[in-house]
Every structure is written in structure tokens, then in C-alpha cells.
Image (tube, rainbow, N blue to C red):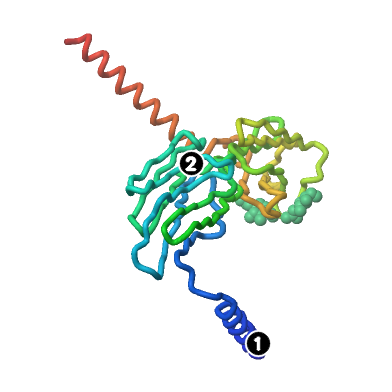
Amino acid sequence: MNLFTQETVILWLRVAVTLSNTEPTAELVKLSTVDSLIVPCHQSVTLQCRISTLQEGLSIYHLAWVLQDGKYLCDVNATGVMRTHPGNTPSAIECSYTPQTQLSLTLLQVQPLEQGKYLCKLRSSHGVKVTTTTVKLQGCYREAQPSVSDEGPTCTFTEVYPDGEVHWFQGPNNVTGDPKIKTKQVKDGKFLTITSSLNRKTVSGEGAYNCSLWIPSTGAYLTSSLVPEHGEARVEGPNANGAGAIGSVWKTFLVLLSTLFLV
Ligand SMILES: *[C@@H]1O[C@H](CO)[C@@H](O)[C@H](O)[C@H]1NC(C)=O
Ligand SMILES: *[C@@H]1O[C@H](CO)[C@@H](O)[C@H](O)[C@H]1NC(C)=O
């Protein structure tokens, strides 16, 4: 173990020495970005492009965050004025610029279509540079809705990304192979709604059912949900609250309306 660590250190030293030896002269200007970012769906992410220079007097002619297809997202011109081009991505973006130092691009709610390469490009008195950050989405879902009816248990997973499968468990047993399981997927835009039902009467005392969302491309379970025992089916998740909020807005509106009529 110790030997291995020492070897690794020596190897790293060699790599470092080789790198500094092969570099003929220090670069006049450098751009640095993160190679890749893995982001949960619906969340924001900030891509930073830092400029560094060893020589005085850097003049920036053009600095930009650009999509692979050449569409601009943010750019700074020779006079130092920054512009944001919001129409070029499906979700909202924000840009910020610290003169001579950094251009940041924020994708406010990353969607599947926004995965890919983002290029930071610089034209300056000290040369032309390009660096790239690759944005990838993590597997995600919005809600898990377990329920039970006379037919048996059902689980619905909404806004799933990427493609997933539902595996069923009863207590510790994997019952995914049961021929009475029916799973269907409905595509809503770039996301999937996956509904899986097991046509099997639930007898209390036999052990509760549990449905798990498996994402083949990541080789992992994203979530799992325990189906309530017969008779206590309910829907959980943010939507239930959302519906309540809308209800109270209506109530306020009706109260306001009735006060108007009373006056
Ligand atoms: C459950 O069964 C399915 C189908 O046979 C299988 O693909 C999956 O890996 C199993 N999961 C576990 C945790 O055993
Ligand atoms: C459901 O079953 C899986 C596989 O056995 C297990 O890892 C998970 O913790 C269970 N989830 C619940 C909510 O019981």
C-alpha cells in the first residue's frame, strides 16, 4: 500500500516535470474552465471562464460563451460591454462579467436539451483561445406517487430522465419477474412519466410492496417508494401542496369578490 502511494507520487512528479519541460514559453494568456459538470435536472449551474495572463496590457477584443452550433449566449465586445442572448437556450440564462478576469454563464433550470458542450472563446491582444465545458444531466424525477386499488399496487414516477424501469419488491423479495406487472411510459416533451401496476391483491400481513426506479444508463436505483397498505393510498410530493396553494388563492379571490358585493 505504502509502496503504491510512493510510486504514484513519483509518477505524478514525473508528469509534472515533463509538462513543465515541454512547455517552451509561458502562454501569454490562458482561459480556464471546468472540463465537465454533472447537474441534477431543473437546477441551476454556473459555468465560469477565467482569464489569466502573465503579461501586462491585455486588450480583450471579444470574449464569449458559445453553443456548439455557434449560437452566442453571452459576449463581451472590445469596449467591455456585455450582452446576454437569452433566446438561444430552452431555459433562462444569466451572464456576469468581471472585467479582464471572468465571464460566467448560469443556466437557471437545466433541461435535457441543454446537455452538451459550451465553448468559452477569447480573441485578444495576447492571442486567441478556446476552452470547453461539457454539461451532463444526472438521472432525475419530479415525484413518486405510490397508490393501491382493488386491482393491486401502482406506482407512477413523473418527469423521469433519462429512460427508466420499475422494479418491484415485496418485503425483501424481488418480484420484478411477475407476469402480472404492467409498465407503460408516456413521453411529455423530453421527460417520461412511468406508470407500473402489479395486478395482485394486497393481503395485509404478506409484506408491503415497494417499487424502485432503475436507470439502466447509470446502473443505479434513482428512488424507491413503499406502497401503503390497502386503504391508506395517498399521493405525496410537491404537487399535492401546489394544489392546496391554488385552492387557497381561489378562496381569497372568492372572499374578496363577496366583500365587493356586500359593499
Ligand atoms: C430485481 O429483478 C430485476 C429483474 O429480474 C433485476 O434486473 C434487478 O437487478 C433485481 N434487483 C435487485 C436489487 O435484486
Ligand atoms: C425497496 O427495495 C429496495 C431493494 O430491496 C431497497 O433497497 C429499498 O430500500 C426499499 N425501499 C423502501 C422504501 O422500502
For label 2, count other residues whose C-alpha is less than 10 Å away and answer few (under 14), some (14-19) or many (20+): many
**Separation of marks 2 and 1 at Cα, in angstroms:** 46 Å
Q: Is residue 144 visible?
A: no
Q: Position of residue 170 (x, y in %)?
A: 72, 48
Q: Residue at x 64, y 83 (%)?
A: 11
Q: Residue at x 76, y 34 (%)?
A: 182
Looking at the rendering, which quadrant does residue 85 occupy?
Answer: top left
Location of residue 198 with respect to 79 vertically, above or below = above
Tag 2, which secondary structure? strand
- Amino acid type at circle 2 is Tyr
For label 1, count other residues whose C-alpha is less than 10 Å away and answer few (under 14), some (14-19) or many (20+): few
Of the pair 249 and 218, the residue shown nearer to us: 218
Of the pair 150 and 214, the residue shown nearer to us: 214
Q: Is residue 81 visible?
A: yes
Q: Residue at x 16, y 10 (%)?
A: 263
- The residue at which mark 1 appears reads as 7
Location of residue 10 with respect to 145 vertically, above or below = below
Q: Position of residue 59 (x, y in %)?
A: 37, 57
Looking at the rendering, which quadrant does residue 2 occupy?
Answer: bottom right
Q: Position of residue 5 (x, y in %)?
A: 63, 86
Q: What number is the disc on residue 247?
A: none
- The residue at which mark 2 appears reads as 72
